[in-house]
Amino acid sequence: MAPVLRIRQLSRSFREGARVHRVLDQLEAEVRAGERVAIMGRSGSGKSTLLNLISGIDRADSGTVEIDGVEVTSLGEPGRTLFRRAHVGFVYQFFNLIPTLDVAENVRLVLELNGVHGAAARTRSLAALEGVGLAARAYSAVDQLSGGEQQRVAIARALVHEPQLLLADEPTGNLDDETASEVLPVLLSATRARGATLLMVTHDEALAGTADRVLELREGRLHERQAPLGGALR
């Protein structure tokens, strides 16, 4: 399949006092449509920075990011925001749900920001919650949910607008092992059901083992493992 994500000579540096720290150094990568790719690396290696550059939250010093044929790095901030809102989903480690909205409203907000309102938005948000096993909690306050349930809501929110690319930054990092083992199959099955490409940053070897490919970020560049770790969850 054609790549849904192309990264070419991507570089990003940060100033630390008088020193300039080069986090990403002419990084190159491609991810094919429908793939599940895990990115691993030590803390501070630039994994989250890379996701922020791919999504357009941050801007690179140089190089390009292309998603589904659109060069995101050439867009201004408003253009990157609109593109991300319509074409990219994001699952964070700490859920980032809005406490003043109920479960369904948290999911529906993404649709409304993309111009889908009323009955259509309600139907799609409930279907997304059904897909992660939480339709019965649609009108609950988010603070009444367990951590695992909140992350499942975050997964539904990330996929409700059917993005081509789902970015997950340590999606099980804020969960205990038992809860993570319950949430992980939900993330994988919901992503596969929506036909999305999944790029996930993780320290978790079990999560990386479910990927089609594992890339390690070292010294500012991605290095592919010779063989995938392999996992039971597909």
Image (tube, rainbow, N blue to C red):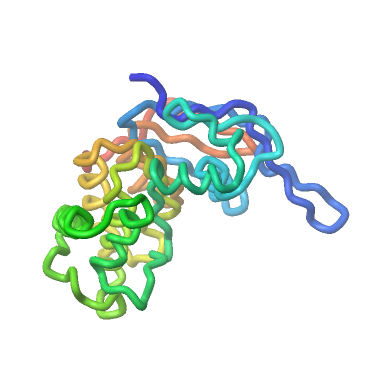
Relative to 6, residue 112 above or below: below
Relative to 209, residue 174 above or below: below
Name the residue nearer the viewer: 213 or 116.
Answer: 116
Q: Give coordinates of residue 229: x percent, y percent.
A: 35, 36
Name the residue nearer the viewer: 42 or 53.
Answer: 53
Q: Give coordinates of residue 186: x percent, y percent.
A: 22, 52
Residue at the far top: name it: 1
Give the side of residue 225 with respect to residue 36, left or right: right
Which residue is depicted at the point 68% across and 44% down? Answer: 23
- The quadrant of the picture occupied by the C terminus is top left
Total marks shown come to 0
Which residue is depicted at the point 23% across and 66% down? Answer: 104
Which residue is depicted at the point 22% across and 47% down? Answer: 190
Residue at the far right: name it: 18
Give the side of residue 66 with respect to residue 113, left or right: right
Tell me which corner region of the image, top left, top right, bottom left or bottom right, holds residue 179: bottom left
Tell me which corner region of the image, top left, top right, bottom left or bottom right, holds residue 140: bottom left
Relative to 40, residue 44 above or below: below
Q: Give coordinates of residue 198: x percent, y percent.
A: 36, 40
- The quadrant of the picture occupied by the N terminus is top left
Name the residue nearer the viewer: 219 or 24.
Answer: 24
Relative to 51, residue 110 above or below: below
Name the residue nearer the viewer: 197 or 36.
Answer: 197
Give the side of residue 67 with respect to residue 62, left or right: left
Residue at the far left: name it: 136
Which residue is depicted at the point 32% across and 60% down? Answer: 154
Q: Give coordinates of residue 112: x percent, y percent.
A: 33, 57
